[in-house]
Amino acid sequence: MPHVRTQIRGAVATALTGRPSTGARVFPSRVWPLQQADLPALLVYAVSDPVDEEQLTIGRPRKLWRDLELVVEARVAGTTGLDDQLDQIEAEVIAALALDPTLGGLAKDVLFTGAEIDLDAAETPVGANKMTFRVTYRHREDDPNTAIQ
């Protein structure tokens, strides 16, 4: 079984697949090479995953509380309405993840913490919206592959 973080990325990608704006174009990786034909699309990736040391248990094996910073990055291309497309995708992503804030029991909670929007007026204008979520989860220190509640 993979690391809980890997399972969380997969669960988020599954939850976001089939949204009206992005359909099946959801990739659980930041480095997926995207072409214009792949857009609009979502990339799902982790940027940090610290342990909350104030929540450590005393006995061994300790139960580690983790606060995963997960990014769902929307990418779009077109000549008009990039802002509107990015706003619509953000609304769809937030609503989809609010349906199951435990991601099927993998997480204690999923919290939307903000978005960073970037537009580039290239030959074909492109835009990105990096939506950040804090995913709180736990596992035993000797078993990072199994989420615990």
Image (tube, helix red, strand yellow):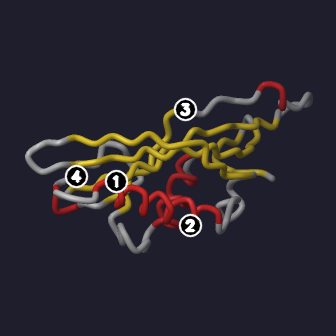
Which of the two discs, 2 and 1, sits closer to the camera? 1
- Mark 2 or mark 3, earlier in chain: 3
Q: Residue at x 75, y 37 (%)?
A: 65
Q: Amino acid at mark 2?
A: Ala
> SS at mark 1?
helix
Image quadrant containing the N terminus: bottom right
Q: Nearer the viewer, residue 122 or 142?
A: 122
Residue 63 in the image: state x and y as whole percent: 81, 37
- Mark 2 or mark 4, earlier in chain: 4
* Distance from the alpha carbon under mark 2 to that under mark 1: 20 Å
> SS at mark 4?
loop
Mark number for residue 96? 2
* Distance from the alpha carbon under mark 2 to that under mark 3: 22 Å
Q: Which residue is mark 1?
A: 83
Q: Which residue is mark 3?
A: 48
Q: Are marks 3 and 1 in contact (CB under 8 Å)?
A: no
* Distance from the alpha carbon under mark 3 to that under mark 1: 27 Å
Q: Residue at x 31, y 52 (%)?
A: 75
On screen, residue 133 above or below 22: above
Mark 1 closeness class: few <14, some 14–19, many ≥20 residues within 10 Å: some
Left or right of 85 on screen, residue 60: right
Residue that extends furthest to the top in the rendered view of this protein: 53
Q: Nearer the viewer, residue 83 or 68?
A: 83
Q: Which residue is mark 4?
A: 34
Q: Residue at x 46, y 50 (%)?
A: 72
> SS at mark 2?
helix
Residue 33 in the image: state x and y as whole percent: 22, 48
Q: Are marks 2 and 3 in contact (CB under 8 Å)?
A: no
- Mark 1 or mark 4, earlier in chain: 4
* Distance from the alpha carbon under mark 1 to that under mark 4: 20 Å
- Mark 3 or mark 1, earlier in chain: 3
